[in-house]
Image (cartoon, grey):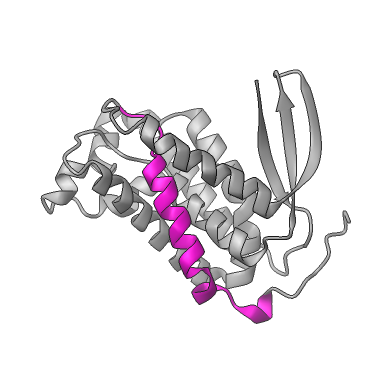
Amino acid sequence: MGGFIPLGDASRRSRHFAVVTTLIILINVFVFLKELSHGDTFVWAWSAVPIRIVHGHRWITLLTSMFMHGSWMHIIGNMIYLWAFGRAIEDAMGSGRFLIFYLAGGIVAMMAQILGDPFSRIPSLGASGAIAAVMGAFIITFPHDRIRTLLIFFFLFIRVTYIPAALLIGFWFLMQVLNIGSVAQVRTGGVAYLAHVGGFLFGVVTARLFVNPSRIAFRPSPSL
């Protein structure tokens, strides 16, 4: 049994501190702590429930749900991915554009999940869709960059290696597509693979509209 954890872009260093990426992470942590303290009432109030959305209720939850998480592992995993890929994309877009892109990607991703099962009463929540949009933008903007990645084998052997972004993100996306069918009939919750795919495709299609070409000149990382 093994896996990988992306740590960041090893091919370039950012021009500016990732203010928005950092702020998004802090908001996610704050909201998760609110979930822990307020329980199911808070979760039901602010997560996106498909049947409510399709009947025109609580549309605000398309936005609020992307800052909520179902467990410690859920939020930790998402924030690791956001930190790994978000900094470079924020640097390429600029903070203002990145914020708009991130929020739009999250909403599109949540809509994709809802369209997959519009009458579900299961709450949908998590930053995964918005982060998938960031990963989609990354593979379009920096396909040849190398991602510093932590490889884990059988929970015993751990090493750091460097994987091309196109390979790592491409493999991740393939896993999301293959898993859509395996959970299509599940109605008790689980991973929102449709949101991942929808967010990723949004990032791929719109990345060039948000990226500022003058901000992506190659700046080698000191580690290279």
**Which residue does the image show at 38% across and 39% down from the upper left?**
192
Q: Is residue 134 left or right of residue 41?
A: right
Residue 202 among those drawn in magenta: yes
**Residue at 61% across, 49% down:** 169
Query: Which quadrant of the view contains residue 135?
Result: bottom right
Lateral position of residue 34 relative to residue 27, left or right = left
Question: Which part of the image, by quadrant, shows the N terminus?
Answer: top right
Query: Residue 173's x, y, as percent?
Result: 53, 46
Residue at the location (67% across, 60% down)?
143
Q: Find the magenta span and give its range.
A: 189-215
User: At x 39% / y 38%, what residue is drawn?
Assistant: 180
Give the quarter of the figure containing the C terminus.
bottom right
**Is 103 included in the stretch rendered in magenta?**
no
Residue 218 position by quadrant? bottom right
56 vs 182: above or below: below
Q: Is residue 212 visible?
A: yes
Up-down relation of residue 173 to residue 213 (above or below): above
Question: What percent of the width, then of the height, locates residue 140?
Answer: 59, 64
